[in-house]
Amino acid sequence: MRLWKAPRKQSTSPKPNYSSPRCAADYIALNADTIQSDTTVNDSKSSFGGLNWLQFKKSIQSHPKTSNQIPDIIINESAEQSYSIGDNPWHLQKIDSIFYQLNSHRKNGLSAEKASNRLHTYGPNSIDTEAKTPIYVLFLLQFCNLIIALLLFASVAAISLQEYTEGIAVLLIVLLNASIATIQENKAGNALDALLQLTSAQSVVIRDKTQLSMDSKAIVPGDIVLLRVGDVIPADLRLIESNSLKVNEMNLTGEPTDVSKKALDLEKKCDELSPSPLNMVFSSTTVTAGSGIGIVVATGMATRVGVIASLLKSTNISARDQNKMCGNPMQQFIARYQPKKTPLERGLHKLGILMGSIAIGIAILLFVVGFLRDTRDPRYPYRPVWLTMVMVAVSVAVSAVPEGLPVVTTLCLTSGTTDMIKEHVLVRKLAAVETLGAASVICTDKTGTLTEGKMTAVKIWGDSKEYEVTGKGFDPGNGAIYIREMEGLHAADTVLLRAMLVACVLCSNTILQQKETDGKIEWEPIGNSSEAPLIVAAAKNGIDRQQVVSSYPLVDEIPFNSSRKMMITIHEEINFVGFENVQLPLNATLIACIKGAPNYILTKCSRYCSEHGETFDLNEQKTTEILHMVDTLSSQALRVLAVAILPLCELPYDRNCESVEEKFSSIPSKCTFLGLIGSIDPERDGVKEAIGKARKASVRTIMITGDYLATAVAIAQNINLLQRGANISHEAIDCLQLRTQCDAYKSIEEIDALTCEKNVFARARPEDKLEIVKSLKRQGLIAAMTGDGVNDAPALKEADIGVAMGISGTEVAKGASDMILTDDNFCSIVAAIEKGRNIYANIQKFVLFLLSTNIGEIVIIFIAIAVGMPVPLEPLQILILNLLSDGMPAVALSLEKGNPAIMNESPRPKRQQIIHGRLWTLVLVNAALIAFGGIVIFAVGMYWNVGKLLVSDIIATNGQSNVCRRWTGHQNGWKLIGNCGIRRADGSMLFPDAVDRFENASVICKGGNYDCMRDGTARAQTMTFIGITFTEVVRAYSVRSFTAPLYASMFSNRYVVIASALSVALTLVMTNTPFVMDRIFGFVYIEWFQWLFVIAIAIHTTFWGEMVKWSFRRCDRKKARWEEMESKIDSLYCEMESMRQKYALEE
């Protein structure tokens, strides 16, 4: 049997507690993908996947991930005997057997020497922490992206060819993108660090017959630990003694209700797999009532929290993927620190593969074609052909890769995280912003997410009268109590109501107090959470707790337990005139107040109280009426408590009696029944609307709760998650039906068949969430999972989007999540989905925008080289186009407000690419138009400024002079420009200065080594650059919508207007500023009519792009008309068929 962490000499790895079959079953559920990959497990055969416990242990030991995690024997130090691992977990063993196995003593505890030896052997009682991902690793992970890799390649290629400006510019862009993403993701906390915050700093332990307060890290198996109210339990303990002990296990189970614990020996095998055994308390949970003593049976990583910690450290990589990564350090590095990719990351990766393939293919093709054609660059005519074509290949690489895409995507997601904070959603992982927009199913907790998380009394019933309590939460000033009568609601102030509420106050140990949170004063209950709604209801009726308690001093208390199902307090009566005007015997000096389960309370009652305070015999008819009302309230998902009182002349037992059971059995069954109080955790404001909005967006909402099925269904109907009148068996299920009789999960096919149609899962165990998420993901759905407890962390990690609760959630759940709800409200998830969809639509817009430009640039270069023209754009010019001229409008497109009707659409398929279907048509059409406009501008520019188009005609050969023709305007016409200077015999020129000049009506002669072809080519390239820039500026307005015309809400996005103006201004500066224009970017001045020409071409290409969108709108209208016509025909057919059947029946 697994006791604690295995000795360090056996293994240094974390040791989950596999001794308990419950924990073993948890481990199977949480790691089914890894275990089933190496073992032939059939979950439908037994509780351990077709294996008994020892067989399962062997399969785990043989598994590469767990082979060193289970010891073979347990050593009893005194007896020096070995005990084989059995199938009997700690909570089913006799306490004496546990003391013997752990070699400890009930009264004396461990000796200091023995404790020291065990601490040395088994290590401290702490969670094995996993180092937080270093910031440099986060930075390096940003480069594990194919588009980034292509940019780095282009940068290195440019630098190696001494094109330092281009290379360094690309490198700086890549570093900027990586820095922004690293800063954002570094804000994420480490989940395993958060686990340490759950452990208690100090614990009271018995050692050497002495009580010691010591550091919890020094606790070892066999220690005796004393528990008091407020203690955080330091390790997993088997209880030895308990006194009305209650523990809050929300950190483990997610349920806020306190759990009663008792020091009993359990023998029923049905308790073997209980998620919370009655006689066990677990590390990180909190004592909320009573006291107890327990013996430590597991510490550190062997505790339940430790098992969860070990699961958080796993990478969830299948054995097949591990084999693929074997010997590949890069893949192993990525898998370790970045185990799962979001749909956006996968889409960008595939886009990078596509663009990279295009770039490589065209670059090779152009190199071969250009080399065979002996293509040269007119600006550098003496450069070798092979070097010229390498530079062309670099130009293609730079043009093929959208340099601005990573930066714009990161800025878009970062902007999205800022906007989501306004929706009470804090994003921890940048790509999760977009992923949430793709969610097709939301798996949500009930408590605190769909509901307020605050039990509230809403109905009170007594003497056939029903009272309604208004207001939510714990604020006694928010609401009042009304009585429902035929003419409506009226303020309630009856003798019966006041007596009932006073009895509730007396029979409770909970108080209300005010607390300041973030500058706001809030009310919160201190004590038992189930008593809070009773105390708040009493306060709403004006009952002062302090005054009531002082009027009825407490004499004795019989606490609630799971067998009695009621709590009894006995009080003295001061100035007795009847209990709050309820008629009681005159000789009564004591009053017992009782609250608890109605069917148990009724067995103690012989009378009931009327509305005005008279008491009558409780006959069978009245009892039936009460039980019927209990059923009615329960069917409304209310938690129903009964209240009664018992007048006493004296205590029915000896005042010195210490036996609680004896006291309880002495209470006579002559109580007076007062009434029923129904409480519920009310739904949050706006939840109904949010679920309806999600349903309209084809996003399925699944509620997973620990409540019983009937309660879960009632709550689901209240919030419209389930439609009233729907077939409940088709939409709701008890999670026990996910398992076979042996408690193993059913086959994958059976699980998937259940999860594909059920929307409510009741009585869910912690591990059920993970199984449900895995099933949904197998069906191709993108699942968002909410959670708040430690037990939810593995499911949050497994889900496509893990959503933790910011208020009620543990730090562990937050650390394992992708995003955090700062208000714990389901409505925030739906709002975030809408925001995520709009963000993704914006990503599609700027990807389409950038991709069209890049493909257009490739086509321009390809056509130019293929026909023998010079390169239309230099690498640096392409880079400026991609980063600034295109980049600024792209950033503006990422800030679009979004489509208000986007939640009327269905979520996109999980495997859908960023650009798909009709969007590819727009990309290719726009790319073709850009290429057409660009090549026309370049050809006209070459003809105007050089007089020739082909390189072979431009570059002088065989000693010819480099002379070209240039159009100088309508008035001046064409002129010849060339080197007309006199050449000496030694080859030098008579006019060595380039400024020397001779010009007549038809010829311009310049001295020096000036070539007209270089200047003319630069002019043509400048025209091409300006033309593409203006095309992109106009097209930015067009791609704001994939269907709507350009002029629709043209100026609604002020960022597009600003970006367009900046882009134009930047172009004017770069093409008209001396030194910058020629020495850096290679631009030259162009004539005014050339400006008009390129602007006209830009508008012309955008016009044809708008015509394509018009054709799409026309097709959509036709399709809509056909669908409407088909719908009418179907409706008419159904009506005619109905009439035919009606006539047939009449005949």
Image: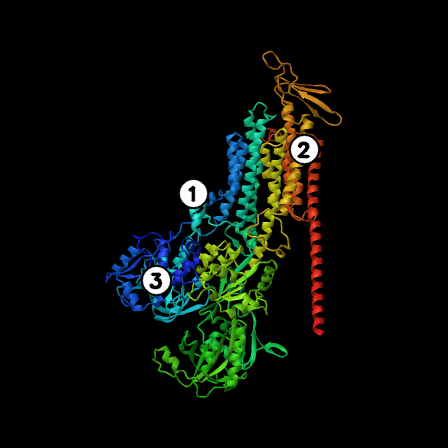
Q: Residue furthest top?
A: 985
- The amino acid type, in three-letter code, at marker 2 is Ile
Check whether the beta carbons of the residues at disc 2 and disc 3 lie within 8 A of each other. Answer: no
Q: Which residue is mark 1?
A: 328
Label disc, if present, on residue 113 of the rendered structure: none
Q: Which residue is mark 2?
A: 937
- The amino acid type, in three-letter code, at marker 1 is Asn
Quarter of image, res 657: bottom left
Which residue occupies the foreground of this view, 469 or 1104?
A: 1104
What secondary structure is marked by label 3?
strand
Give the CA separation, mark 1 to mark 3.
Answer: 47 Å
Give the CA separation, mark 2 to mark 3.
Answer: 82 Å
Q: Marks 2 and 3: which is nearer the front?
A: 2
Q: Residue furthest left?
A: 79
Q: Is residue 1073 visible?
A: no
Image coordinates of residue 339 in percent, x first then y, are: 46, 49
What secondary structure is marked by label 1?
loop
Image coordinates of residue 804 in percent, x first then y, are: 49, 57
Q: Residues within 10 Å of mark 1 (few under 14, many from 20)?
A: few
